[in-house]
Amino acid sequence: MTLYYATSSWSSQPQVPQKTVDLWNHVTEKKNWRIVQLPNGFYQTEYLDLEKENIWHDVTRRETMEGAEQAIDASIAHYQKKLSFVNGPQVVKTFE
């Protein structure tokens, strides 16, 4: 059996394609999200496609409207955190 193993490291800035950064910026705005109720009673969170009008991508399903809105808020926070590291590691403490 052959096992392929690869690693990567950043020497300066993370190598994130601009298209990905644009998507992350798009989904960090709550106006690009919606909640729809499915026939089974669950609530589905969806975000608007970045390039095509009126195309929505489903993300999560929750039992309650509050749960769906919390899922959107958590997704926004997740992508904001990813965006904060696009320019490389952040200095959190320095020593004299």
Image (tube, helix red, strand yellow):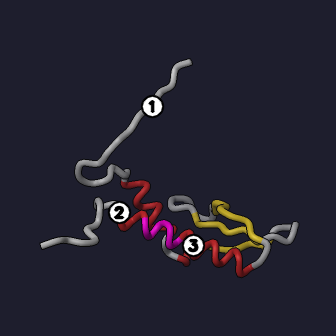
- Which label belongs to residue 5? 1
Q: Residue at x 69, y 74 (%)?
A: 68
List x then y, in percent, for residue 57: 64, 60
Q: Nearer the viewer, mark 3 or mark 1?
A: 1
Q: Give the camera-side residue of 85 and 23.
A: 85
Q: Amino acid at mark 2?
A: Phe
Query: How far from the left and from the top, in percent, is residue 64?
Result: 77, 77
Q: Is tag 2's residue or tag 3's residue first in the polypeptide sequence?
A: 3
**Residue 87: where, in percent of width, then height?**
29, 61
Give the side of residue 75 with respect to residue 95, left or right.
right
* Residue range highlighted in magenta: 76-81
Q: Residues within 10 Å of mark 1 (few under 14, many from 20)?
A: few
Quarter assignment of residue 71: bottom right
Determine if the magenta segment contains residue 32.
no
Number of numbered discs on residues: 3
Q: Residue furthest top?
A: 1
